[in-house]
Image (tube, grey):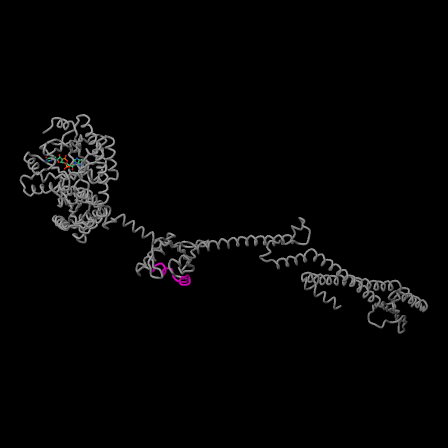
Amino acid sequence: MPDFTSRLKQFRKASPLSFRLLAWILLFSSAFTLLASGIQIYSDYRTDLDQIEERMQVIESGYGSSLTRSLWALDQQSLQTQMEGILSMPDIDHLRLKIEPDSELVMGERPRHSDTLVHSFKLTHNGDRPIPLGELTITADLERVYSDLHRRLGFIVGTQFFTVFIVAVLILWIFRHLITRHLTAMADYTRDLTLTNLSRPLRLDRPDTPSNRHDELGMVTEAINGMRERLNEDMERREKDADEILKFSKAIDQSPSSVLICDRHWKVEYANRKFSQLTGYAPKDIIGRHTSSIIEQGLENRQAQQLWQSVRLQVQRVGVWQGEVNNVRRNGERYWEQLVVTPIKDVNGDITGYLILGEDISIRKRYEQQLLRQANYDILTGLPNRMLAMDRLKLALAQARREENQVGVMFLDLDNFKHINDTLGHDAGDTLLVEAARRVSSCLRGTSTVARLGGDEFLVILPGMTGPEAPGQVADRILETFASPFLLSGQEVFVTTSIGIATFPTDSDDSGTLLQHADAAMYEAKRNGKSAYARFTPEMGEISHERLQMESLMRKALELGEFELYFQPIVDTASGQAVTAEALIRWNNPTLGLVMPDRFIPLAEETGMITSIGEWVIGEACRAASRWRELGGFDVGVAVNVSPRQFRDPGFTNTVKRALEITGLNASLLELEITERLILDNTIETAEILRQLDHYGVRLSVDDFGTGYSALSYLKSYPFDTLKIDKSFIQDVLTETDDSSLVRAIINMAHSLGLNVVAEGVEEEAQTYFLQTEQCDFSQGYYYSRPLPESAFMDWLRTGKR
Ligand SMILES: Nc1nc2c(ncn2[C@@H]2O[C@@H]3COP(=O)(O)O[C@H]4[C@@H](O)[C@H](n5cnc6c(=O)[nH]c(N)nc65)O[C@@H]4COP(=O)(O)O[C@H]3[C@H]2O)c(=O)[nH]1
């Protein structure tokens, strides 16, 4: 018994549903069985009672009349027999016949217990009148009925309970086999289900048939497996998401841009590594702080408020803010940062935070500022350049229009700059420009602008002038500051400047035209002898125009063969015999007519065209000298002018060499005339070029001697053969004693240095006597011949003398 109880407990624990089912089946089956059995037993009991009652009725109807007759006849024997017959009937245990008036006949044994059924009926003789004879009382014993009842009840209940129990166990087994064990398996499966074994599906221990698949267990299994697969997919997705998130978080952390992530209230939630590197703040220093306190550190309160306001408004309205902020690092160092601020939104589009990306643009900013400076300022002098100058001029004109006053525009050009640059080198030229810029600036007040337009050209803008005299006063001051020498490459050099002035609104109300007018006036100042200033007059406009026209015509002149060489003889002073001819260029232009070198050589030098023109001259001169020899047998050399720019050209010596080679002219018949100013440049290059030319056997002469600043002693350093005294000394040699003594001194010193002397500009016979007396070797001038076209020159040679 204890064994069964413990098993029952186990079963109850292991299979609560089955146990409960069993209990309910037993309860309901028992109740139902009891009810059915009760009804059945009661029905049997009623049938037994009805049979007994029926039997009593049968006795009354069957024995009533016979008993009455026996009683009437007082036939005791018959009475007894009849009563014994009745008593032998089943269940009838006791008969009592009450005989009138007062006797009775009793038969059988009266049952001692109370479970009896009593039936009485009167015995009456029916004659004329009914005579009551007695009454028979039949007592039936119900014990048999009850014992039958008990027996049947026990049997029915017993068999029913057994049946119910067997059926219940059967149902239970079926239920357990078909359902609960699977439910238990599902429970075990789901209990054991973890994220690590999601790949193992739930399989029930039953055949995988279509009907099984579609029953409730199949559906639950499918649902569980579906859930498992979804979980599995979710897990895989999550793992992937986690990988992605890790990747992104690493990317953000290692991003080359600084990254700040803030919450909805602009409180910092995250700062990446770059942010810390950029600002010097560790994440712990700034997490939880308001963003405004971080990105506005370099600003004043009001600026910071404005910036913050605009950031917030723009991010809300436009969805992005970007700008450049001059921020401060933790160590106080300033830096430029490019910021981009954008909102972070959730799936509903609600802002959950903000993303702030920053990039250190200090280098770019510096570069931009440098570019801006380069774009607007001249690097060498630090002065505004042409672009900025023109802007300032336009501004000054606009202001003058409003305030109805005047603007002075001054165009400055250093008179000797090209020469100094060519002779003393570019470093000296640069020093000169810087110093010139300083001197010009020192003559101006605050509102004025001095700018370098390029090369040696400067522009001065004098805004807000009330009268026309101011530019003249400023120009005088500038000319004065140029009076003292400049120290260039250790030498004191005098440099002058020419200034052209144009005034707004008198000369023009347009900035470009004003500049052109000032430029034209500057040329006029140069023409008037340099180191001077000139105000613009309408006639100057034409000159400036002519200069432009000449430049464009000259560019095509070589190609069109418009240049021509004239030749002027240089004669032996003593004999008057031509020894050399100076080649002098002329330009025959259909528009300009015959243009003399003084008009176009300076322009050719300025524009650089002198290099190609000079090359042509050397080639043509050598060809001509060869022709004279070949055609006329004249042993006459040719002298060619070489301008400083041409002389410095890297290909110059080659040009000379090539011309000699091509024409076959003896190098000693070619003389190169180099101006005295070029010798001022005692650089190694100049000496080297002269040495190389000397090496070729070319003769070298110093032209225009006396006009420069060189001392005769300088000439010793160079391989010169001839010295040409400038015509300005020869012209007055008979009238000016200074000039005659100077010419005499030059001739003597030149001879002492082993140099031949040529006197230029000899126009009168008397001059020839002076030069003969002073033993000047050679002479050149109109007295002998003007420069002549080649054919005329050859004629001159043929005829011998002037
Ligand atoms: N008043 C006066 N003048 C006289 C007399 N005799 C000669 N002349 C002029 O004096 C100039 C002499 O040449 P320069 O001093 O080298 O001066 C030359 C020279 O520096 C330059 N030049 C001429 N041709 C060339 C050339 O092919 N190349 C270069 N680079 N310069 C040249 O142009 C300058 C002027 O040349 P041109 O007009 O031909 O002027 C020539 C000539 O015509 C005279 O008795 N009285």
**Residue at position x 78%, y 63% in the image:** 157
* Residue 653, horizontal then vertical, whole percent: 24, 37
Q: Position of residue 185 (x, y in %)?
A: 66, 57
Q: Which quarter of the frame holds ligand 1?
A: top left
Q: Magenta stretch: residue 440 in it?
A: no
Residue at image coords 68%, 58%: 181
Quadrant in which the C terminus is drawn:
top left
Up/down of 448 relative to 150, above or below: above
Residue 180 on image: x %, y %: 67, 58
Residue at image point 79% right, 61% down: 159
Q: Is 264 displayed left or right of 450 in the figure?
A: right
Residue 376 position (above or below residue 144)? above
State the residue in front, 153 or 8: 8
Image location of residue 718, percent across then percent down: 19, 42
Q: Nearer the viewer, residue 714 or 370?
A: 714
Looking at the image, the residue that sits furthest to the bottom is 102
Tell me: 149 left or right of 228.
right
The residue range painted magenta reads 282-297
Q: Is residue 642 above or below residue 52?
A: above
